[in-house]
Amino acid sequence: MSFDKNKHLRDVLDTHRMSHVQDFVNKVKNRREEVKAKMHDHYGGDKYPSFGSGSFAKHTATNVKFDLDLVEPFKHDAFGTLQEMFDDIYDFLAGEYKNTGVTIRKQKVSIGISFPIEEGDDKPVELDVVPGRELSDDDYPDSHNLNLCFNEDHWGFKRGSRQQTNIQKQISHIEGKSNERQIIRLLKIWKKQKNKKYKSFIIELAVIRALDGYDGDMGLWPRLKYTMEYLRDNIADSSFHLYDPGNTNNDVIASMQDYDRQLFNSDMECMLNNIDGNPDFYLPYYFKVNEKYCGYKEKPEGAVYPTNTQRFG
């Protein structure tokens, strides 16, 4: 019997569903509401209502890696500078959770919160608070544009500099794209399992671009293969751009080094070649089911996966 690639990929997605970890998701949601209430009580009229973002809001989350971010849109006159905004929120949260075992840390454009691991959980509840400031007085209610603060030198930005974005537009960009979401989740599963460092936002935008106007076989494997071929053929091309739907002046792939773009190209080519040569071995190697939520055996007893994934045979 030939290996059913579509069935295997359905199993991969099914075993990575968020419903398998609903109790943990509820804990994260409860903590997010707790932080949301603290921010509202402290900053009140200085900000607009907070909202969720990240992979959970975009429905691209998997049960091994997901983000429940909390975006905090501040009014333009709330702070003198973006860095003042960032530091003030960090200081407030650090004070609120002092001596509680909660870790508060400054990150690139967000403040990370990590709660102690509770009994029965294998990881801590973690949240990212993303502060942003409207571009001018009373602009946000109509535009939803925000300036984020870069707290450290990164992606070509200096500490204290700003990046305009529109997180609502980023979320809207993927709304209704269920077929694209499946492929995004599969590539994010591969990324997590193989410890790849590519930005999930780049994968998200590239998949949406690849499948724009796609009218081929709607099976999971044909769509995944088509997307991987598109990435192989375009990701390393200097003329290839991926513009942030929240700021069309921001080419997000420009933050990706040429070496990493070539590596991404090589990853796609190697995977396609290996799967084509031996699909029943390599498809489960690159796209593994989450064994915690099924009785699937990852590989036959005694089988050894290669450490160097050159083309099979």
Image (cartoon, rainbow, N blue to C red):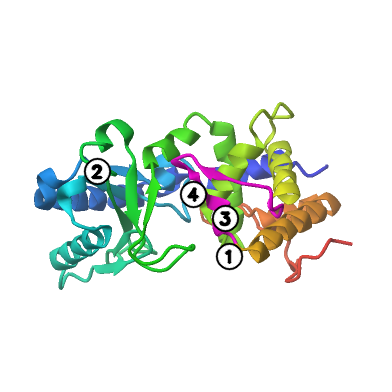
Q: With 103 as the anchor, is 109 left or right in this view?
A: right
Looking at the picture, how far across and down is residue 120, in whole percent?
A: 34, 62
- Label 4 – label 1 distance at C-alpha: 15 Å
Looking at the picture, how far across and down is residue 173, in whole percent?
A: 48, 35
The residue at which mark 4 appears reads as: 62
Query: Is residue 3 visible in the rendered structure shown here?
Result: yes
Of callouts 2 and 1, which one flags the residue occurring earlier in the amino acid sequence? 2
The residue at which mark 1 appears reads as: 195
- Label 2 – label 4 distance at C-alpha: 24 Å
* Label 3 Cα neighbours within 10 Å, binned few <14 / some 14-19 / many ≥20: some
Helix or strand or loop: what does disc 4 sit on? loop
- Label 3 – label 1 distance at C-alpha: 22 Å
Helix or strand or loop: what does disc 1 sit on? loop
The boundaries of the magenta stretch are: 235-256
The residue at which mark 2 appears reads as: 50
Find residue 168 and report its image quarter.
top left
Q: With 121 as the anchor, is 270 left or right in this view?
A: right
Seen from the viewer's position, the closer of residues 235 and 207 is 235
Placement of 111 over or under 20, stated as above or below? below
Q: Amino acid at mark 1?
A: Asn
Q: Amino acid at mark 4?
A: Thr
Tell whether position 238 is magenta. yes
The residue at which mark 3 appears reads as: 254
Q: Amino acid at mark 2?
A: Ser
Q: Are marks 2 and 1 in contact (CB under 8 Å)?
A: no
